[in-house]
Structures are given as C-alpha cells and as structure tokens.
Image: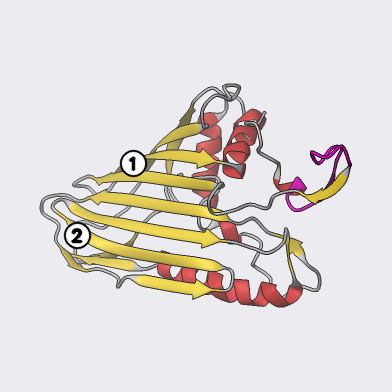
Amino acid sequence: VATFGTLPVQERGKSALLMDDGSGQPKIVELPLTRVETDSVRVETTLTVGAEGHATGESKVANTGVFDLVARQVFAINPGNAATLADRLLQTSGQTGSGSYFHSARENLTRPFGYVMNFHLDNYIQLPGPGAITIPSGLGSFSNIAYAFEMTAPPARDFAIPFVGGHREEITKVLLPDSTTILALPKPFKLDTPFGHYESNYVRSDSGLVVRRMLDLQFASATLSAEDYVGLRTMWIAIARDLKSQVVYQ
C-alpha cells in the first residue's frame, strides 16, 4: 500500500502515457524522480549509557514519499517478526545487542507511516575511561544515510545503475554517566558535490552530546552513469569517514 501520489522506486523517471493532457489530447510524460522536497526520512535517537558501559536507545523515524513506501513494504514482508528483524539488523551492522520495532498501522494511508525502535547495546563504551567511541547506528532507519550508498562497494561500474535521491536527517542524543567527561569532539563537516550536500556537527550538552547529520541527494535522472558513479563513490568515502568519527572521553 502507498499514499496517493507515491510511486515505487522502479517507476521513478519512466515515461508514461497521459490519456488527456487537459486539451483532450494524449501526451507522453516523465514520471517524477525522487526529490529532496518530497522524499525524506528523519531519525531522532536518544542513547543512554549506563555505568557499566551498556547502552539503551530509542529511535523515532518519520518518513515521506518513497521512504514512507519502503518502510510499509519492509514491515509487510516481515509481519510479526519485529524482534527477529531488529536482532538481525544489529548483527549485520556489527553491533552486539537486541531490539524491537513498533509501528503504526500500515494500511492507514491518511497519515505518514512512522515507527519506533527500542534497542540495547552490550559493552558499547569502556568504563572507566579514557577511551573513544563512535556514534552507533543502533537500529536506525531502513533508508538512513549509510543505506543511501549501499550500491557503491565496487570501485567502478560498466553500466548505469538506479539510484535514489531525497533528504535524510539523523539526530542522535547521547546521554553519558555523570562521571564521564568529553575531552574532544569531531570537527563539523560539510561536503558539496554535483550530486548533493552533506553536513554534520557535534555539540556538547549538559549530559553528553548531540550529533546531527544531514544528507541531500538529487539526481537528473533515475539512473547514475558509470562516469558519475565514480564521483558519487568518492562522496560516499568522505561521508563514511565522518560517520566513523570518534568522541574522546575520560
């Protein structure tokens, strides 16, 4: 199921026959591409670190456009298996722990489809310090920043491939034990390319830190040429480096 006007990724950018263009005549039109203005996913995560170094987290995901459709499809394929799906995603992302998903009614098309993830990470941080940590992805979103580049593993491609644009935003609040002090944060990072914009910033808070990351991707067609693929992969390498940035603590 999909909200009115939302097209599957496979149909984006294709030609379609409009039977009446308003003048009584048929017309060939191009179906809309994914766009920053209409296709978005926003993830807000709160991660609480305990005195022994374990962490519990909650992520709230809001989707629009094609990402709304993707989320509905994922839960349609895995009905009643939220905990199993969560545990598998944690394992495949290199995280040790457990979790589960909770979502609104898939069939309700009167409002955007959202879901919540609760998760537990074992031995997330070494305490007492000193030490350094990366910001974990937890369960995150099925359409998060890293997933946007999941097809960029090969160094080059011989043919064009489909690629999805849109807006992705991830805000993570990390709450640390009172005895833990942040010594150093990564520097803010910005990147502009012909394919879009990425930025991140890391800010201390009274109880820990807040990390905000944002990615906008916009493509001129539904497929990415072999030549442009190399440039997009270079963009991903720079973003991946930022996603692995470390916070130093004592």
Q: Label 1: which residue?
A: 57
At horizontal 72% and vertical 58% (from top left) the residue drawn is 222
2 or 1: tag closer to the N-terminus: 1
Residue 250 as seen in the image, left or right of residue 77: left
In the structure shown, which secondary structural element does the residue marked by tag 2 occupy? strand
Residue 94 as seen in the image, left or right of residue 13: left
The rendered magenta stretch, by its main secondary structure, is classed as loop
* Residue 72 magenta: no
- How far across and how far down the image is residue 19, in percent? 87, 37
Residue 84 as seen in the image, left or right of residue 250: right
Front residue of 5/189: it is 5
**Which image quadrant for residue 88?**
top right
Q: State whether residue 66 is above or below residue 131.
A: above
Q: How many marks?
A: 2
- Tell me the amino acid under the disc marked 1: Gly
Residue 201 as seen in the image, left or right of residue 80: left
At horizontal 35% and vertical 45% (from top left) the residue drawn is 45
Does the rendering let one see residue 56? yes
Q: Nearer the viewer, mark 2 or mark 1?
A: 2
Front residue of 136/200: it is 200
- Tell me the amino acid under the disc marked 2: Arg
Callout 2 environment at 10 Å: few (<14), some (14 to 19), or many (20+)?
Answer: some
Mark 2 → mark 1, Cα distance in angstroms: 19 Å
Q: Label 2: which residue?
A: 204
Q: State whether residue 194 is above or below residue 18.
A: below
Residue stretch in magenta:
11-25
